[in-house]
């Protein structure tokens, strides 16, 4: 019963994240105006806005102008649905669920914004860091000192990687957005989370990066989605993964 609720909550959150992913890089408000078709501008009725179901019922087309709706919308909804389902399976009905909710939601939004624009907006990463630190004062997940240490380690580690990367490759390998993203990850997941995310994110990024470069001849791929995937891996299966590696 609660599993279904967590999944439905995730779908609804995913629907909201789609709005954020589209509007935040364009400097638009995320609450006004109400959703409309990006193609014909027709305002969407609540019936056109049901996560996942509307896309299936409309067969991926706008009800008013017939323009194709990107399959990424239901994909983001499904992804967020599954992430909250995993989060509930891992944590259960505890305060910690609400603690990790902003982190998971923002990691999804930031990843897709980074894919679209190559940027991780300060308007998301900085408030997320502050929220992580503020929530650490609640009992449970992480203590305030551990959260502060996480933020500092995120900042220093990424700063060091950025300097090293610049010296080695003679170009910006890391953006300021990546540094702030890892400060936010540190605020929620502590020093361990920072190192785990950076390490696993780099491995994932290299594997995918080699594939992308071979295919598209592009030498820049956004790092944010891989760091985010590393942070989620740590959150859901960090201890398990480390035990597999013999730690
Ligand atoms: Zn339309």
Image: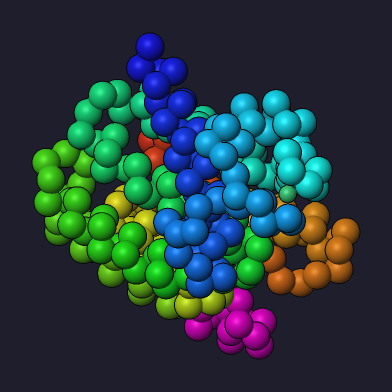
Name the image quarter holding residue 185. bottom left
Q: Which x, y percent locates residue 144?
A: 14, 56
Quadrant containing the C terminus is: top left
Quadrant containing the N terminus is: top left
| For residue 171, side relative to residue 178 (left or right) | right
Prevailing SS of the magenta stretch: helix
Residue 175 in view here: yes
* Residue at the image position 35 percent from the left and 42 percent from the top: 101
Q: Nearer the viewer, residue 59 or 3?
A: 59
Bounds of the magenta segment: 161-173
Q: Which x, y percent locates residue 100?
A: 32, 43
Residue 234 in view here: no
How many marks overall? 0
Name the image quarter holding residue 139. top left
Q: Which x, y percent locates residue 12?
A: 47, 36
| For residue 172, side relative to residue 238 (left or right) | right
* Residue at the image position 29 percent from the left and 23 percent from the top: 92
Q: Which x, y percent locates residue 89?
A: 39, 23
* Residue at the image position 38 percent from the left and 35 percent from the top: 239
Residue 168 located within the stretch drawn in magenta: yes
| For residue 68, side relative to residue 89 (left or right) | right
* Residue at the image position 45 percent from the left and 40 percent from the top: 13
Residue 150 located within the stretch drawn in magenta: no
Above/below status of 90 relative to 105: above
Above/below status of 182 relative to 5: below
Q: Residue furthest top?
A: 1
């Amino acid at each position: 019963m609660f599993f279904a609720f967590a999944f439905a909550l995730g779908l609804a959150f995913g629907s909201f994240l789609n709005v954020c992913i589209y509007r935040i890089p364009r400097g638009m408000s995320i609450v006004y105006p109400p959703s409309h078709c990006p193609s014909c501008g027709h305002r969407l009725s609540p019936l056109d806005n049901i996560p996942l179901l509307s896309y299936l019922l409309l067969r991926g087309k706008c009800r008013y102008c017939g323009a194709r709706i990107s399959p990424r919308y239901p994909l983001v909804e499904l992804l967020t649905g599954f992430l909250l389902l995993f989060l509930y399976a891992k944590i259960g009905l505890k305060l910690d669920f609400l603690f990790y909710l902003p982190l998971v939601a923002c990691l999804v939004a930031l990843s897709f914004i980074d894919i679209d624009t190559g940027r991780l907006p300060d308007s998301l990463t900085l408030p997320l860091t502050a929220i992580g630190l503020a929530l650490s004062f609640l009992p449970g997940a992480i203590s305030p000192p551990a959260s502060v240490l996480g933020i500092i380690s995120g900042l220093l580690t990424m700063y060091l990687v950025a300097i090293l990367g610049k010296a080695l490759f003679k170009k910006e390998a890391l953006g300021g957005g990546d540094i702030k993203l890892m400060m936010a990850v540190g605020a929620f997941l502590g020093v361990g989370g920072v190192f785990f995310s950076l390490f696993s994110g780099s491995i994932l990024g290299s594997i995918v990066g080699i594939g992308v470069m071979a295919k598209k001849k592009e030498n820049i791929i956004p790092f944010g989605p891989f760091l985010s995937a590393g942070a989620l891996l740590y959150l859901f299966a960090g201890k398990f993964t480390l035990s597999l590696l013999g730690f």
